[in-house]
Image (cartoon, rainbow, N blue to C red):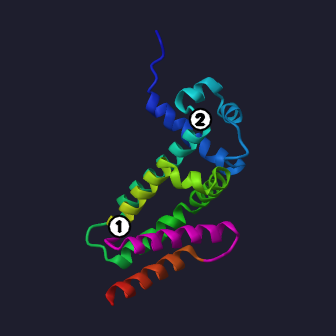
Amino acid sequence: MPKIVNHEQYRKELLYKCFDLFAEKGYASITTRQIAKELGVSTGTLYYYFPRKEDMFEQLVEETSQEYLLIFASELKDGQTLSQRFEALANFALRYEDRLIKETCMMVDFCQQQGSDAIRENQALRRIEKQTKQSITEFFGICDPALTDFIMTQVQGLMLRRLSGDDVSIAEQIVLLGKMLISYLEK
């Protein structure tokens, strides 16, 4: 009897196993052949699910971004104030700090490898960015796109500072960001 394979589930398993490989070795430094070897699958299997290494990376970033958004959304409660929502974001960032920093490293390496023009034209990354912005707008009830960009920039910058070994407090910075935005919005 042939083995029944849930291809979508298997694709996701391969992606999540790739996360640490991309984070540790970098997008530019690892080949599809090396990825297949590390995962214990044939290159043919990998190419079946991901025709290009770039496809694998993009799908990985998309899957992890969606996962983060779902987790964060599940932690928000009805009736929370904006301040409480920023506290929830701070707690989320603390809990997932290691993975968020690794994802930041992966994105920096990928962007460096691809070049700024290719990144701006990358439809998968644009889709992920649009979805993230929309979710942040909904989570925080902020209608100004510039404020949404500001929140994203501050959190990404915070991850870069943590990556560089800076002991800046994630919770303190995100709560401060919330206080600043609340003060700004009240004016």
Taking the view exactly as shown, the residue that stands out farthest to the top is 1
Where on the picture, by quarter, is residue 86?
A: bottom left
Q: Position of residue 156 (x, y in %)?
A: 55, 67
Of the numbered discs in the image, which one, if any, rests on residue 52?
Answer: 2
Mark 2 Cα-neighbour bin, 10 Å: few <14, some 14–19, many ≥20: few
Q: Position of residue 84 (x, y in %)?
A: 37, 75
| Residue range of the region highlighted in magenta in the rendering | 139-168
What residue is rendered at 66% in x and 44% in y? 21
Mark 1 Cα-neighbour bin, 10 Å: few <14, some 14–19, many ≥20: some
What residue is rendered at 30% in x and 66% in y? 77
Q: Position of residue 33 (x, y in %)?
A: 70, 31
**Of discs 2 and 1, which sits in the foreground?**
2
Q: Is residue 149 magenta?
A: yes
Q: Is residue 15 above or below residue 131?
A: above
Residue type indicated by callout 1: Thr
| Badge 1 element | helix
